[in-house]
Image (cartoon, grey):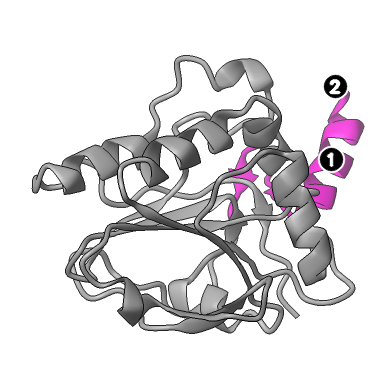
Amino acid sequence: MSELSRRAFLAASGLAVVARGSLVIPSPAWAAPKTGVAAPAFTASTTTGKAVSLADQRGKIVVLEWTNHECPYVLKHYETNNMQALQKEATGQGVVWLTIISSAPGTQGFVSAAEADQLTASRRAAPTSVLLDPTGAVGKMYGATNTPHMYVIDKAGTLMYAGAIDDRPTTRRSDVQGAQNYVREALQAVAAGQPVKTPVTRAYGCTVKYA
């Protein structure tokens, strides 16, 4: 890829380029929650209009996944079945997986409830629920900056992990194999009642398209 094409791709993805070609992941204008303390409480609507509250999930491990189906970084994990496999693995063990869409109306990744359901079906995704956050209220509460941006909350409601899905910040499908999956490691640690070895990483991907 030429430097000009690369810059155009990064601009479309919502990522900036500095002089040496490094990716810059913008800092949010709001404070991100800290791990090791109570996760921010929220209530959001599913695609069926049902209200889902984090408080209602007490006693269960919860994963929050920020997504944008048009983002090439998200496509990497869905087109290789990496995200779906992790969803099924987690929910099969009783984890509550909430996929959250915070794209504002008219921006990349915004979908109606029906479109969100169609995406879940066509991709054979397996979240517990898909939550719609068009105002960005929940996303900003968590300091979600990118798609995908992942969070793991333990049974007591404590935020135990925040950051990237893995250690390969690229769009290359081949990088899924052999990557260190931070979310899987965090889930295993939390389920075993052990500290998460890497509780915070820098999320990579497209910027969340807030209003």
State the image coordinates of residue 116 (x, y, percent, origin top left): 75, 60
Residue sitting nearer the eye, 17 or 40: 40
Which contiguous range is marked in magenta? 1-25
Image vertical order of residue 119 relative to residue 124, above or below: below
Q: In this view, does 68 lie to the left or right of 45?
A: right
Residue sitting nearer the eye, 126 or 98: 126
State the image coordinates of residue 151 (x, y, percent, origin top left): 40, 57
- Residue drawn at (26%, 50%) of the image: 199
Q: Where does label 1 land, which residue?
A: 9
Residue 97 lies in the magenta stretch: no
Residue sitting nearer the eye, 111 or 5: 111
Residue 87 visible in the picture: yes
The secondary element bearing badge 2 is classed as loop
The secondary element bearing badge 1 is classed as helix
- Residue drawn at (11%, 42%) of the image: 192
State the image coordinates of residue 30 (x, y, percent, origin top left): 49, 80
- Residue drawn at (25%, 72%) of the image: 58
At label 2, the amino acid type is Met
At label 1, the amino acid type is Phe
Query: Separation of disc 2 and disc 1 at Cα?
Result: 10 Å
Q: Are marks 2 and 1 in contact (CB under 8 Å)?
A: yes
Q: Is residue 7 left or right of residue 168?
A: right
Q: Where does label 2 land, which residue?
A: 1
State the image coordinates of residue 55 (x, y, percent, origin top left): 32, 81
